[in-house]
Amino acid sequence: MALERQVIFWIVALAVFCGVVWLLSPVLLPFVAGMALAYLLDPMARAGERFGVGRGISALVVLTVVIVAIVVAVMTVSPIAADQFNAFMDSLPGYVTKVRSLLSDPSRPWLAKIFGGAGQDTEKSLGDLVSQGSGFIATFLASLWSGGRAVFQVLSLLIITPVVAFYLLCDWNRVVVTVDGWIPRQHRDTIHGLLRDMDAAIAGFVRGQALICLILAAFYAIGLTLVGLNSGFLIGLMTGLFSFIPFVGAATGFIVAAIVAVAQFWPDWMSMGLVIGVFVIGQGLEGYVLSPNLVGAKVGLHPVWLMFSLLAFGYLFGFVGLLIAIPVAAAIGVLVRFAIRKYQESPLYTGQDGGHDPHQGLS
């Protein structure tokens, strides 16, 4: 009965937690972002302590350096990205017209066959696809600023997030000790082991993948700009940043870059090949150099599970859900692996009860 009561208690606690997050999701964003920022910067603050710097001063210095770096990066990149975005949207009808003419050209019937038909069917399909894509982009951008809460949320994110991150960085050790005191004593060693596994999975993926995204964003932006692709800086930057979701960022960026390259360079196969080469090198760099060294295989987050978590939590809790999706996915993964290990050690799996071998006495 004690085990059943504990299970019921934790199920109810989880349901209450999810309900509170869902109800307060409109105002939780700066606090969740501050917690995430403090978690990411805690190793740097601890490094400052090892050099004899006080925790408060170390937290202030680390947070100030990171904020200044972010502001400088945004101020440097945003004008170029904004100009290229406007140019891309202005050029989009021309890209569509050029690709339509190529697909409907009777001298190249193999292109029409590849894309599922010729003539009017191909043009109609492509037109519908572009119309749907343009409508989605317009709806998405409008939704970002719909209602009077948008400006308030942005201001609260810019003001409250650094404050929350600073106080959590200063009090991180006390928070850990306080939470540790809530753990039931009879299960403390087991829970400590699970929490260490969760921390390793979350820290390994989030910190490693964030660094990978920044490296890939710089690589794709510089590479596509050097090969002369229109809006190459913007396309490369977004490809790298969206690489936080495995395969989705690279696939989306490649499709957009391929359409722009065909519309811009056709029939210059050399230039189109250079665009493809940038993505081939980028994927090789990510798969064989960056991911094995910065993330590694010990994280245990399968790409399918990761994509499902991001979509599910984003749908349920909005942008707050995107921030908590990966930590929750990592925690669930650790708990599932722990449950499977316990199941494989149980009599239900081994067929043994209390150490008695059912095969004894049969020989």
Image (cartoon, rainbow, N blue to C red):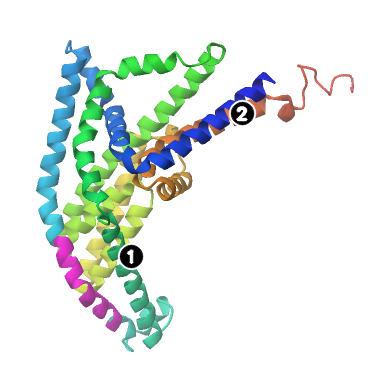
In x, y percent, where is residue 275?
Answer: 24, 62
Residue shown at 73% from the left, 29% from the top:
348
Left or right: 35, with 192 as reference point: left
Crowding at label 1, few (<14), some or many (≥20) Cα neighbours within 10 Å? few
The residue wearing badge 2 is 8
Is 44 contained in the magenta span?
Answer: no
Residue shown at 31% from the left, 30% from the top:
35
Crowding at label 2, few (<14), some or many (≥20) Cα neighbours within 10 Å? few
Residue shown at 12% from the left, 35% from the top:
68
The residue wearing badge 1 is 136
The residues tagged by marks 1 and 2 sit, at their Cα atoms, a distance apart of 43 Å
In x, y percent, where is residue 182?
Answer: 47, 16
Type of secondary structure dominating the magenta stretch: helix
Quarter-of-image position of residue 107: bottom left
Is 90 contained in the magenta span?
Answer: yes
Q: Is residue 47 visible?
A: yes
Q: Is residue 266 visible?
A: no
In x, y percent, where is residue 263?
Answer: 23, 74
Q: Amino acid at mark 2?
A: Ile
Magenta span: 84-101
Q: Secondary structure at mark 1?
A: helix
Q: Nearer the viewer, residue 232 or 297?
A: 232
Residue shown at 64% from the left, 23% from the top:
5
In the rendered view of the protein, which quadrant contains the C terminus?
A: top right
